[in-house]
Amino acid sequence: MAIISKSILSKRGLDKLKNKANELLSRTIDQHVTLAVTGLSRSGKTAFITSLVNQLINEGNGTKLSFFDPVHHGNFIAAKRVPQQHYHVPRFDYDAAISALTSEPATWPEPTHGISELRLAIRYQPKNSILKYATDMATLTLDITDYPGEWLLDLPMLKQTYQEWSQQTHALMTSSPRAEQSKGFLTKLTQLDPFACASEELLAELAQEYTALLHTFRYELGLSVIQPGRFILPGDLAGAPILEFFPFPGLDSLDGNDYQNAPDDSLIGMLRLRYLEYKEQVVRKFYREHFLRFDRQIVLADCLKPLNKGKESFADLELAMSMILESYHYGKSGIFSRLFSPKIDKLLFGATKADHVTPEQHAPMVALLNQLIHQNKHHLNYEAVQVKTLAIASVKSTNSGVSKHKGKDVPVIQGKTIAQPNATESSGIFGQKITVFPGAVPSQLPNDDYWQSNNFNFIEFAPLSGLNKQQCLPHVRMDQVLQFLLADKMI
Ligand SMILES: Nc1nc2c(ncn2[C@@H]2O[C@H](COP(=O)(O)OP(=O)(O)OP(=O)(O)O)[C@@H](O)[C@H]2O)c(=O)[nH]1
Ligand SMILES: [Mg+2]
């Protein structure tokens, strides 16, 4: 009897020890990735994060992740949402987004206006690494941050004085396609004495007008270069005086000394001061507090809408992409690496809404986005950053097939159009089902001839109906996204 209890005790003791050792080991081997998701407004960030989370937490329930090795090889165990890391950063509202996508009729999630965060704990079985000898189960903690791409458009301001920034912005505002809309505002500014004592009210009023112009550029003209980016996406800074400044024309014609000595309460002095504060307290702060802790980054771009809008909108996207890419310009001469020491080791470019086109157009979509990046690719230091481009649909909303047209097979997609505002079921335009060939995507940056001879008509579709919160959302290449961004941390 005494012998048996001794062996039970020692077995219990051994198990306890083993558990303790396992706990200690898994604590040391647990991995952590901070993934940042960005892109200009409406590029598809919320849909992307919602789909990524949905695919992982519902894995096994209709998942189509065959290109994601941990699932393909069977070492993915499960994922769940856990409390986020930073309590002062708003939570990414997964529940609202998934509820919208799975409601009847299904709708797209609401636009978001700032930064938000979500954390996932992903359990997996190490199979190939040395970890397999140490533990049966490891955890990858994934912190996902959603932030507006517009905030990256501000980086180039860090190297510009107020005078330089004013001149550059003025040049943009006096050329097509911004000139027409900007005329009234610029004329008003030229009537002001830059050295006169300025009131807070006047500054607030003019800044509001400038912000309204930026909204027109973005949402009516479909332009991408919006500076300062926070003016249209202020987050928690809405209404703060730090967002109340604007470019002032004709600074190059002022006497240099007069400009330098302008008192802080003069119009020009106040504008200059707020510009400097904006750079320090908003732009630099964002890089310091958030950007520097990101390990991996996905930049989403909707190239189809600017193609629909035309040549100038597309050219503006090109310029915006090059400004955004400054943040990944790690070469020795880049402003970024002189100011900060980032640690991003993988950078993925996603050409979003690939389900708006027929599948054979996905390769041209990738080629086109690559061309947009390519102009800047030589800046990216490939030794430090691994770069990939994919055409994706986070929430696939069309079905593709083949249709006969004049005896020929034509690739087509079928989906439900987005309900027009104020539409009713009886008006016929509420979620109409259509089958179309929406057009070919150019695989090169389109030239003048191209714009004259091609019309794009990429249609916005509503999400498919009948989706369920506990099931995986239909997608295009989200498994390849996961493979690139996470698989190497789960071996
Ligand atoms: N067909 C299709 N449409 C998509 C997809 N992803 C996004 N969209 C469309 O793009 C719109 C914008 O998507 P969001 O995910 O809200 O984009 P966002 O970048 O978060 O936008 P903001 O929050 O305004 O910055 C949606 O309302 C959809 O109309 C997709 O995978 N397929
Ligand atoms: Mg959003």
Image (spheres, rainbow, N blue to C red):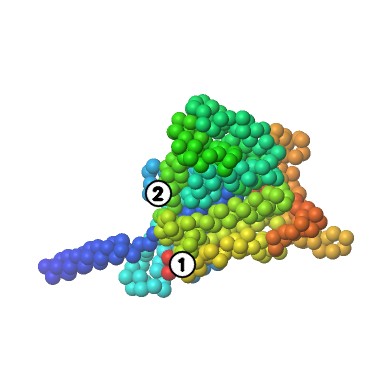
Residue drawn at the location 25% of the way across and 65% of the way down: 21
Q: Which mark is residue 384?
A: 1
Residue drawn at the location 40% of the way across and 50% of the way down: 288
Q: Position of residue 118 (x, y in %)?
A: 44, 49
Residue drawn at the location 72% of the way across and 52% of the way down: 311
- 307 horizontally vs 373: left or right: right
Q: Position of residue 423 (x, y in %)?
A: 72, 35
- 22 horizontally vs 387: left or right: left
User: From the viewer's perspective, is residue 310 above or below residue 419?
Assistant: below
How far apart are labels 1 and 2 at the CA level? 22 Å
User: From the viewer's perspective, is residue 419 above or below residue 10?
Assistant: above
Q: In this view of the protein, which residue sits in the foreground, 73 or 94?
A: 94
Does residue 106 appear in the picture of this structure?
A: no
Label 1: state its secondary structure.
loop
Location of the C terminus (image quadrant): bottom left
Q: Amino acid type of disc 2?
A: Glu
Disc with the residue nearer the chain's start (1 vs 2): 2
Q: Residue furthest right?
A: 406
Q: Amino acid type of disc 1?
A: Ala
User: Within 8 Å of ligand 1, the CB of disc 2?
Assistant: no
- The residue under label 2 is 289
Contact between labelled residues 2 and 1, with CB atoms less than 8 Å apart: no
Q: In this view of the protein, which residue sits in the foreground, 256 or 124?
A: 256
User: From the viewer's perspective, is residue 188 above or below residue 472?
Assistant: above
Q: Quadrant of residue 490?
A: bottom left
Q: Which mark is residue 186?
A: none
Q: Position of residue 22 (x, y in %)?
A: 29, 65
User: Within 8 Å of ligand 1, the CB of disc 1?
Assistant: no
Residue drawn at the location 46% of the way across and 56% of the way down: 336
Q: Position of residue 274 (x, y in %)?
A: 47, 37
Location of the N terminus (image quadrant): bottom left
